[in-house]
Image (cartoon, coloured by chain):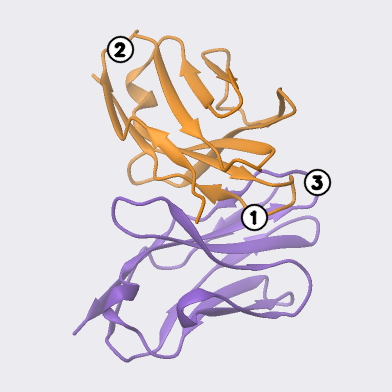
Chain colours: A purple, B orange
Amino acid sequence: AQSVTQLGSHVSVSEGALVLLRCNYSSSVPPYLFWYVQYPNQGLQLLLKYTSAATLVKGINGFEAEFKKSETSFHLTKPSAHMSDAAEYFCAVRNNAGNMLTFGGGTRLMVKP
Amino acid sequence: EPEVTQTPSHQVTQMGQEVILRCVPISNHLYFYWYRQILGQKVEFLVSFYNNEISEKSEIFDDQFSVERPDGSNFTLKIRSTKLEDSAMYFCASSVGGADTQYFGPGTRLTVL
């Protein structure tokens, strides 16, 4: 069985500060990992994905994530937060045996001016 | 840019009533999915559908639920006799292939009274 844990249901940063959203996964087989973002009243939008190529993955809006097998982590970072980054972020895992996504609980990012 | 659409955006129903949630996946996609998110909880997989058959389903997807692709564009989720605990946001998603990125719709908020 696979699972995803996102540490911190709420994260608050100042505009211009580093954004770090944590995600740890468990999977019995090599995983595919995803970060989705949800803006208010919108659907889930893919930010980036890891599919066993490069361990450092770059996504949209300046976000990136690094796959660390030894730590079973896939943390999301952005060097400098912007007000428009305020949203809920979901980490998800899929194994190559099926196509269902298993999501973490989500982290709401707040950006202070 | 093509997107997944869902109707209605909000559905209110009485316990025991049948509801049908509608989705229009992206036109060249072949795999379709339903997920749900109960308020304050994780996004959970319900079912995936390919080639007019269910390809995978979760324990949540019991006999009360059914899915259908009634024509070339719509993908529906039916709940036969709604319960209070069915109140949730229901997300439809689609992908080109089973291993490809899933694109999500904006969701339908179902409220069962």
Residue A86 lies, in percent from the top left, at 30, 70
User: What is the C-alpha distance between the residues marked 3 and 2?
Assistant: 37 Å
Q: Which one is closest to the eye, mark 2 or mark 1?
A: 1
Task: Name the subunit of mark 3.
Answer: A
Q: What residue is pinned by disc 3? A: A97
Q: In what element is the residue under mark 2?
A: loop
Please state which of residues B105 and B62 is positioned toward the viewer in this rendering: B105
Q: Which one is closest to the eye, mark 3 or mark 1?
A: 1
Quarter location, residue A35: bottom right
Q: In what element is the residue under mark 3?
A: loop
**Looking at the picture, which amino acid does disc 2 mark?**
Met
Q: What residue is pinned by disc 1? A: B101
User: What is the C-alpha distance between the residues marked 3 and 1?
Assistant: 15 Å
Q: What residue is pinned by disc 2? A: B15
Task: Name the subunit of mark 1.
Answer: B
- Residue at 71 percent across and 44 percent down: it is A99
Residue A33 lies, in percent from the top left, at 65, 63
Q: Is residue A52 above or below residue B47?
A: below
